[in-house]
Amino acid sequence: MEHVNIWGKSVKGSGLKSWLLKSVFAACVYNLWMERNQMIFQHKVSSHDLVILKTVTAIRDLLNLKRGVKKSYKNIGLCCSWSLSTSVFDPHCLV
């Protein structure tokens, strides 16, 4: 638990990178917990690739909902590497 607290305090700010790191952490914890519950209660085991795919998809879907991101080279690079829509830069765009 101490590592989580230290990591959480080190990710500061409200920029896209900070928001991305927080989302990655939350999605990883959530998806691992769901897989754990599936193994215990439904006796089903997913492949590692499927768990990773579910996690990445959840993060990408969440990030595509983000709006009003400052348009900078760093943020454009993050959008390209995560295959995000450029609508994250538009504060008024509705998906």
Image (tube, helix red, strand yellow):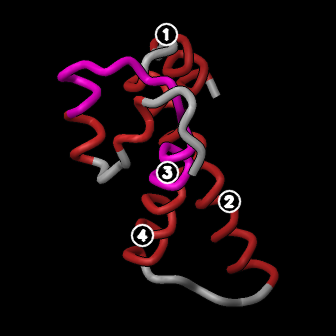
Residue 15 screen position, x and y as percent: 44, 17
Residue 37, compared with residue 41, is above or below; it is above
Q: What amino acid type should be assigned to the residue bearing mark 4? A: Leu
**Foreground tag (4 vs 2):** 4
Real-space CA distance between mark 3 and mark 2, rounded to the nearest whole angstrom: 15 Å
Indicate the amino acid at tag 3. Answer: Ile
Report helix, strand or loop for mark 3. Answer: helix
Q: Helix, strand or loop at disc 1?
A: loop
Q: Quadrant of residue 43?
A: bottom right
Q: Is residue 19 above or below residue 6?
A: below
The span shown in magenta is: 59-76
Q: In this orientation, which residue lies closer to the viewer: 59 or 45?
A: 59
How far apart, in angstroms, are the residues tagged by discs 2 and 1?
A: 27 Å
> In 3D space, how far apart are the residues under numbered discs 4 and 2 (Cα atoms)?
15 Å
Mark 1 → mark 4, Cα distance in angstroms: 27 Å
Using the image, determine if residue 69 lies above or below residue 94.
above
Helix, strand or loop under label 4: helix
Q: Which mark is residue 13?
A: 1
What's the distance in space between the residues labelled 3 and 4, CA to CA? 10 Å
The residue drawn where x is 31% and y is 49% is 82
Q: Residue at coordinates 40% horizontally, 29% vertically from top-left?
A: 89
Residue at which label 3 appears: 59
Q: CA distance from mark 1 to mark 3?
A: 18 Å
Q: Name the residue: 60% across, 42% down.
A: 26
Q: Is the C-beta separation of discs 3 and 2 under 8 Å? A: no
Question: Which quadrant of the rendered structure holds the N terminus?
Answer: top right
Residue indicated by mark 2: 33
- Whether residue 70 appears in magenta in the rendering, the answer is yes
